[in-house]
Amino acid sequence: MDRDHPHSPLEVLDTRLHADPSRVVLRPFHLGWQARNAPGGRAAKLVEDILQLSEEKAAEEYTRVVADFGERHWQTERLFEERFTEVAERLNFDKSFLSTTCKRLIGAYFCHEYTYAAAALMNPSIVPHPDQSGMSGGAIRFVMSLRAVGEGHISSIAFREGIAYPDGHFTLWPQGPFATSVDLDDESLSEGTGPVTVHRHSESTLSNTVIFPITEQQRNGLEDLRLTRFDHGNGAYEWIGTYTAYSGSSIRSELLRTHDFCQFELQPVLGEAGRNKGMALFPHQIDGRYAMLGRQDGKNLFLLTSERLDRWEDEGTLLMEPQYPWEFIQIGNCGSPILTDEGWLVFTHGVGAMRKYALGCALLDRKNPGKVLGRTQYPVLSAVDADRSGYVPNVVYTCGALSIGDRILLPYGLSDSAVGFATVELSTLLDSMV
């Protein structure tokens, strides 16, 4: 038991991950958004102004840009050229007579440097890595997703890789000096309402990859990804996450789907249930149907089922209501359920007095997850001491935990500013339930 949490069965570990303004990525302007929000022809006028420069002046200006930013990003000049190609195709102008320097300078004007995790780093989820080669002694290689918040309070999805061990400790793979954004497979799809597919660069690691908002519905953030390794049967796995796409005025649940964490499909959750946030997918079908947990009324926890992964019409059945003072305002899931021999283990969050968030836990029946077998009377984790201070104070929150043998590794957000880690034996956690 951790001394700072008198009712907690969890052991809080020392590792902390913090918001970091030094983590920057070279990011393009989305011309579709710009065209709707800016005076007509602004992009074309910018290109015209650049083309008015003499070759000597253009070279001088480009030298200045490279001196300022060349060492801060990975393959900077190649990215400038790629961005130029996108701009030229969008504006449909003749590029055959332009020098390489001029092309790169135009590309630089249509890029910007973005600190994707300057404001906050929070709300992690964690799943087994697709590549488990070389693992022994019960160790598991994992992928952890993180909600990174940068300039303008825009949320994106970042990743860290590492190895978790059965004794409760873990290691994180180091990040490289450069971060890269995923690339959109078809630029035109960003203006539609359907799914889009993105991929990380073949020479970039997952730990240095960021998924930014792409579509209009996502433009103000991809929030709180809840990942699970979904078992389609016969050894066919797919990594699926639910997240909230925030446009700035509306929300919608969406799915992230990948088989390898190299290519990702981002698709809307269709149906009435998709208008809510905080949905969490069970890691396999139950009685031939997909199942999710959700907070459909903003206060209580519901169980939903569907014949289709991408459409959820049924608002579900009531599963849990607030029962204890620390969760009187609302309860919700904290990630996809974890299957154990005793049943489905579900981490929950509760909101109590002074809007303080705390983590709890519940156990659902294996065959009938609509039946609650037990739940914690007290929080298993809450913000104390220095952890109470942050971008949003008095909050602990997670989007998923990892089972390693007889233990659970739980990464969690601290006051929307940092990420902490805790571990616990499964039997100890189950013994804390009533």
Image (cartoon, rainbow, N blue to C red):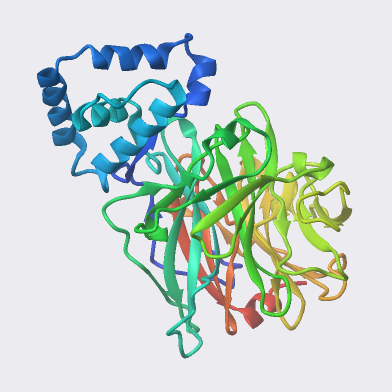
Q: Is residue 343 above or below residue 276?
A: below
For this orientation, the residue located farthest to the front is 96
Q: Is residue 247 above or below residue 342?
A: above
Q: Quadrant of residue 171?
A: bottom left
Q: Is residue 147 above or below residue 229?
A: above
Q: Is residue 71 left or right of residue 208?
A: left
Q: Is residue 65 above or below residue 121?
A: above
Q: Which residue: 29% across, 36% down? A: 80
Q: Which residue: 60% across, 62% down? A: 400
Is any part of residue 116 visible from this angle? yes
Is any part of residue 1 visible from this angle? no
56, 7: nearer the viewer: 56
6, 297: nearer the viewer: 297
User: How many tags in the picture?
Assistant: 0
Q: Is residue 95 left or right of residue 57?
A: right
Q: Which residue: 69% across, 48% down? A: 278
186, 358: nearer the viewer: 186
Q: Percent position (x, y) of residue 179?
A: 34, 49
Q: Percent position (x, y) of residue 192?
A: 65, 32
